[in-house]
Every structure is written in C-alpha cells, then in structure tokens.
C-alpha cells in the first residue's frame, strides 16, 4: 500500500514538473513564484539531447535512401529468371 502511494506521488510530481515547464520556460517566460526553477529547467533541457524537426527529417531520408540502395543491390544480385530446363531424351524417359 505504501509503495503505491509513493509511486503515485512521484507520478504527480513529475507531471506537475512537465506542466510547469510547458506553461512557462518552454514559451520563454519566467515561472511566477520561483524563477530559479524555470532557469534550472531551461539548463536541464539545454543539457539533454533533443531532436529537432530537421534532424528527424534528415534521418528519415537517410533511412529511405539506404533502404532503396539495398533493394537495388538485391535486384542486381538476383538471377534474371531465365531457367535452363534439362530435357531428357525420349529414350531415357521411357525406361
């Protein structure tokens, strides 16, 4: 019972932090009661690695290009589909 309460409180604190960040520092405003909290959030976000839209688009394009190149190589390595049929002579087939 006690662990459930602790986990729920941690979840509430985390969600309050995310909401506070989204409401103030993310938009460029200071937090009303604790400006230090907003500064700390900005520094934390600047320190963490993030992906911007251009990076995501570039990675997607790179993956698609690599996939197409791999498919082209596979098509070049495939046999052409021509098969040589070995036909037994009629004398051998009647044995």
Image (tube, helix red, strand yellow):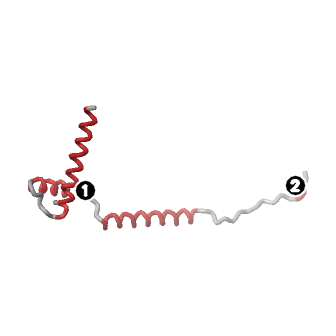
Which residue of the protein is positioned furthest toward the top in this rendering? 1
At which x and y percent is residue 73? 52, 64
Tell me the residue at 16%/54% (across/down): 41
Question: What residue sits right under mark 2 in the picture?
Answer: 93
Residue situated in front as seen by the camera: 92 or 20: 20
Mark 2 vs mark 1, CA separation in Å: 72 Å
Which residue appears at 18% of the width and 55% of the height? 20
Residue at image coords 16%, 57%: 42
- For residue 57, above or below residue 94: below
- Whether residue 55 sits left or right of residue 91 in the image: it is left
Disc 2 crowd rating (10 Å Cα; few below 14, some 14-19, many 20+) is few
Q: Residue at x 26, y 41 (%)?
A: 8
Neighbour tally class for label 1: few under 14, some 14-19, many 20 plus, Cα within 10 Å: few
Give the mark toward the camera: 2 or 1.
1
Q: Earlier in the sequence, mark 2 or mark 1?
A: 1
Please state the horizontal and vertical placement of residue 38, each as a whole percent of the image: 13, 56
Pointer 1 residue? 49
Q: Are marks 2 and 1 in contact (CB under 8 Å)?
A: no
């Amino acid at each position: 019972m006690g662990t459930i309460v602790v986990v729920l409180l941690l979840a509430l604190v985390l969600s309050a932090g995310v909401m506070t960040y989204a409401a103030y520092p993310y938009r460029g405003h200071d937090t009303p009661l604790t400006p230090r909290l907003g500064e700390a959030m900005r520094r934390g976000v600047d320190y963490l690695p993030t992906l911007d839209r251009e990076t995501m688009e570039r990675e997607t394009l790179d993956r698609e290009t690599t996939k197409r190149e791999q498919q082209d190589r596979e098509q070049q390595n495939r046999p052409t589909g021509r098969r040589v049929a070995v036909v037994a002579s009629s004398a051998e087939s009647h044995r």
